[in-house]
Amino acid sequence: MAIRNPVRHALLGRTLTVGTWIQAGHAAVAEVLANVGFDWIAADCEHTDIDISAFTTLARGMHGRGCVPMARVRENDTLAIRQVLDMGAQGVIVPLIDTPAAARKAVQAAKYPPEGVRGFAFSRMNNWGVDFDEYVRTANDDIAVVAMIESSRAVDTIDDILAVDGIDGVFIGPYDMSGSYGVPGETGRPKVKEGCARVVAACERAGKSAGIHVVIPTQESVNDAVDAGFTFIGLGVDTVFLDRGARAALKCVRS
């Protein structure tokens, strides 16, 4: 069972991939979104109650449906990263990376020795040991590691973060970024846009992908993200899709 991860190769090739986020930790949500055709789907284990058991359920819901399962872990913690990978994540998005040391810690957690410190086990990712040898042989090349860039400090150290071997790309959290610049929620402010542009330029120099969350996807907002140079784009989130779809349906009746 060779685990081939097209998203990691796209990150390093700066090729466009489009994904989305899950905040509701139910397998049916994963099944529905995986059938839509997203390249990747990331479970948000940082800002929700999705624990390792719920993530495993989501990964099972995505299995065999053509998308790459990923997880934004709750923190830059070796065991948190190791657990989601053992349960089937093919990539991790690691929050609050603002120094090269933090980036190295994330990579170390995601890679088997000698590149890292990830522990070996029979688990879901290797079909409970049936495909252990093949998984171990390919995992370090297939697991994607993406650093969340969420602060002005991270922008200031972005070249050094991207220079860490094993960081395949970065992902901007636009709302956290705006907060770090003292304008929470105002993602269109010049200082926030300038920070984002600095990250994209650094990714171009490093040959790695810049990602961003288009929280409310419209044709205009998606075009803006692509035109700005982002190639790892998260569209919306399950909770927003549910809310907006329900409101639009109800409006049809009430109007």
Image (cartoon, rainbow, N blue to C red):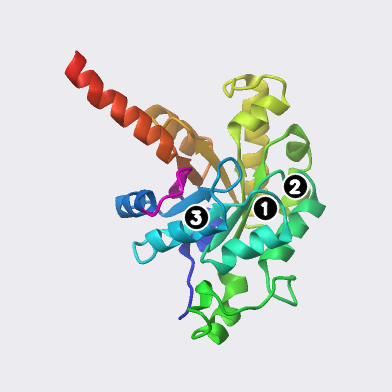
From the viewer's perspective, is residue 200 above or below residue 191?
Answer: below
Residue 113 is drawn in which quadrant?
bottom right
Quarter in which the C terminus is drawn? top left
Q: Earlier in the sequence, mark 1 or mark 3?
A: 3
From the viewer's perspective, is residue 134 above or below residue 22?
Answer: below
Q: Label 3, on which residue?
A: 54
Q: Give the amino acid at mark 2.
A: Asp
Give the residue drawn at x 35%, y 66%. Answer: 64
Q: Earlier in the sequence, mark 1 or mark 2?
A: 2
Q: Label 2, on which residue?
A: 159
Q: Earlier in the sequence, mark 2 or mark 3?
A: 3
| Neighbourhood count class around disc 1 (C-alpha, 10 Å): few under 14, some 14–19, many 20 upward | some
User: Closest to the observer: 124 or 182?
Assistant: 124
Q: Label 1, on which residue?
A: 206
Label 2 near label 1: C-beta < 8 Å?
A: yes
Residue 206 is situated, as x and y percent measured from the top left of the image, at: 67, 53
The residue segment tinted magenta is 17-27
User: Can residue 229 be seen from the camera position used here?
Assistant: no
Q: Give the amino acid at mark 3.
A: Ala
Residue farthest along the right direction in this orientation: 101
From the viewer's perspective, is residue 36 above or below residue 111?
Answer: above
Residue 198 is situated, as x and y percent measured from the top left of the image, at: 68, 36
C-alpha separation, residue under disc 2 versus residue under disc 3: 35 Å
- In the image, taking residue 82 as reference, residue 5 lies left or right, namely left
| Neighbourhood count class around disc 3 (C-alpha, 10 Å): few under 14, some 14–19, many 20 upward | some
C-alpha separation, residue under disc 1 versus residue under disc 3: 35 Å
Residue 202 is drawn in which quadrant?
top right
Residue at disc 3, secondary structure: helix
Residue 159 is situated, as x and y percent measured from the top left of the image, at: 75, 47
Quarter in which the N terminus is drawn? bottom left
